[in-house]
Amino acid sequence: MSTTHPWDQTAGRKLQRSSSQPCELGGCSVATVGPVIESAIQTPDGTWRVEVVKRGRDRWYRIVHGDDVIDWLALGSVERILGEAGVDLGAMVDAA
C-alpha cells in the first residue's frame, strides 16, 4: 500500500533566480525542493521503519514496511498503525 499526499508533486516549491531580472519582471522560476528525512527509527530486524520527513516548514512521519509506504502521518497515526501491527515503538532503534 503506497499513500502520498495529494499535493506531493507541487508542495515544497521555492522561487529561484533564472536571470538578472527582478522576480517582479519575470526573472524567477519555480524549482521543486524534495522532502528531507531528518531522522529514522526501525525495528531491530529492519522490518519496520519510521521516518521523520521535512519539506519547507512541513514535518510529518512516514512508515516503511517492505514495499509499503504510508506517508503524511501524524504521530498518533504512527502509534496506532504500529500498535495494530503488534510493533512495540519502544523497542525500535535508531536507523543507520
Image (cartoon, helix red, strand yellow):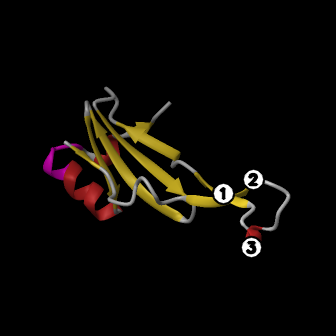
Label 1 crowd bin: few (<14), some (14–19), many (20+), radius 10 Å? few
Q: In this picture, which residue range is highlighted in magenta?
A: 83-87
* Amino acid type for the residue under numbered disc 2: Ser
Residues tagged 2 and 1 counted as in contact (Cβ below 8 A): yes
Asked which secondary structure carries label 3, the reply is: helix
Residue situated furthest front in the rendering = 25
| Label 2: element kind | loop
Considering every residue shown, the one lying at the far right of the view is 20
For the residues labelled 2 and 1, the Cα–Cα distance comes to 6 Å
**Residue 12 screen position, x and y as percent:** 53, 59
Residue sitting nearer the eye, 44 or 49: 49
Magenta span: helix, strand or loop, mainly? loop
- Residue 86 falls within the magenta-colored stretch: yes
Q: Position of residue 71 (x, y in %)?
A: 33, 51
Identity of the amino acid at label 1? Ser
Residue 29's disc number: 1
Proximity of marks 3 and 1: CB atoms separated by less than 8 Å: no
First in sequence: mark 2 or mark 1? Answer: 2
- Amino acid at circle 3: Glu
Give me the residue at 51% from left, 45% from top: 39
Closer to the N terminus: mark 3 or mark 2?
2
Q: Label 1's element?
A: strand
Question: In the image, which disc is placed on residue 18?
Answer: 2
Q: Earlier in the sequence, mark 3 or mark 1?
A: 3
Dot 2 crowding, Cα within 10 Å, few <14, some 14–19, many 20+: few
Determine which quarter of the picture holds residue 30.
Answer: bottom right
Q: Along the horizontal axis of the image, is 40 left or right of 29?
A: left
x then y, percent, for residue 72? 35, 57
* Residue at image mark 3: 24
Q: Residue at x 53, y 56 (%)?
A: 55
In three-dimensional space, the C-alpha distance between marks 3 and 2, rounded to whole angstroms, equals: 12 Å
Quarter of the rendering occupied by the N terminus: top left
